[in-house]
Image (cartoon, grey):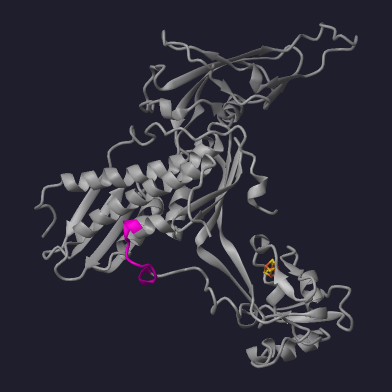
Amino acid sequence: MTQEPSVRASAGCAVPRTPIDGASDRPPPTVHIEQSADACQVTLTLENEGHTLGNVLRYMIARDPRVEHAGYSVPHPSENRVKVNVITRPGTRALDVVQSALANVALLCDELSGRYEAAASGGTSSTCP
Amino acid sequence: MRYCREEAPSDRSVAFAGYDLSSSGRLPLMREDYGSGSRIATDYEPFDGAKERTRLWVRMLVQTADEVVMDVGGVHAPVANALRRIMLVEVPTMAVEYVTVHRNSSILHDEQLAHRLGLVPVLADARAFAERPPGSAAATARDTLRFRLRVEAPSETTSTPNGGRAQSTAVYSDQIEWVPLDAAPQPAARPRLMPGILLAKLAPGQAIDLEMDAVKGYGQEHAKWSPVATAAYRMAPRVQITRDIIGEQAQRLVRLCPMHVFDIEDGTGRAVVRRERDCTRCEECVRVVRAPVIDTADDIEEDEGEGEEEAMPPEDAADTDASFARSIRLGHDPEHFIFSVESTGQYRADVIFLEALHILKHKCVRLLQEIQRRPEEEGFG
Ligand code: SF4
């Protein structure tokens, strides 16, 4: 099973068209926020979300140098709910960190979409090694 | 645990070799070198949009309507995994959900037939539809595609062209017809179900007459709404030869690898890594093989307490016949994923990954908006 670029068979595939908003008719996100008195600690409880968003959010929060701790858990496997917990260094609002992490994931998705569309249409996508 | 296995026939004196599969003997290379791939938060450098941009890359390897295989580089496992999970269960499709049976004298029970119909891919773009509110009886063209299946097998008295008696009649998904709802404008391409799928076989005189509503849904609820047959990734394998392997040993190595990763360089006779991507990390090439032992029941008991020094070749020894464990490094690139996505037919395969990116982005943006909308004083702070 050699996967080399030569096996590409893309004759019939043009650039994928921009998706119609697949998420638009989903119910709005339900989130419960608990903050500590100094705002350095926050726990978000997200309804109708699971490991998919929990882990990627934890990852992006943990990449922020202002963060002391970031973790997530799905308290019960048959409840569709995830908790994300953040503790920041003094002087940083934990909720700010969460917000910038969310914006960063969105940015990453945009960038990757761009790369993907370029690669899918046969253009040069990147600086691939 | 102790195994006994026949060596490759070309291996001269060694007829049988017992080898140790205990953790100490089996995974000497995982801990050093590239590591197991799991990382903790501090392993990632701070997010910097501009830097991130230069790191990302995508390369298509296979791109057809049914299947996409691609390299995605510069992303970390949590992102790759989120995208995989979204492709599996969060990209919407249309699937048959409500079936009204007017007549069914086939051998299949109504519910069996209905379940089967649910699994037939509906070839329509679900992104153009709205979700049908649960429990709503009224179907509209905005949220439902209605189909009808009406077949009746010729009765027994009908003679077949070749003069014999009527046999069973196969019912295929091709026979399902779209029924327009409302006075909605006719779409350019008539919606249909994936053709060529056998649904039932009717004995002479049996009939099926039913109507079905396909609605928008998500794989989370039932796999019939999943747009992919597989959506998987693996980390790109890395194989390095850290010490020259030449001559007979090189040839032995080439034979050893079941995926033919290694090759011999012309001229020098040195083993080189030729097909790195094909490595499955089976560890055949680095497995520590003990000196030949005759495995008897006694022997196993006596050997029980043997430590890992036995399993590992001496620290400074050159490779023995037994193992290349000190000459080869195995690992994988934690920022290079090989994705493989196969569509079930509703979407072109190359759209599904893009859709997953789009959905992940929207999840984040909507959550961000929701948090920003909250008044400052919320919480117990
Ligand atoms: S682990 Fe070694 S033997 Fe197994 S496929 Fe990879 S290179 Fe070949």
Left-right relation of B91 to B105: left
Tell me where residue A66 sits by quadrant.
Answer: bottom left
Q: Quadrant of residue A69?
A: bottom left
Quadrant showing the C terminus of chain B: bottom left
Q: Which region is colored magenta? A: B41-50
Q: Residue at x 39, y 17 (%)?
A: B140
- Find residue B159 and report its horizontal and vertical position in percent: 85, 7
Check the image and report above or below for B110 versus B40.
Answer: above
Q: Is residue B364 above or below residue B49?
A: above
Using the image as rendered, state which of residue B224 and residue A122 is in the foreground.
A122
Residue sitting at 64 percent across and 60 percent down? Answer: B277
**Image position, residue B128 (x, y; %):** 42, 25
**Image quarter for ligand 1:** bottom right
Residue under the point 38% across and 17% down: B138
Res. B66 in view:
yes
User: Measured from the top left, where is residue B16 in percent x and y?
Assistant: 84, 80
**Residue at position x 33%, y 42% in the image:** B362
Q: Is residue B178 left or right of residue A87?
A: right
Q: Residue furthest front?
A: B267
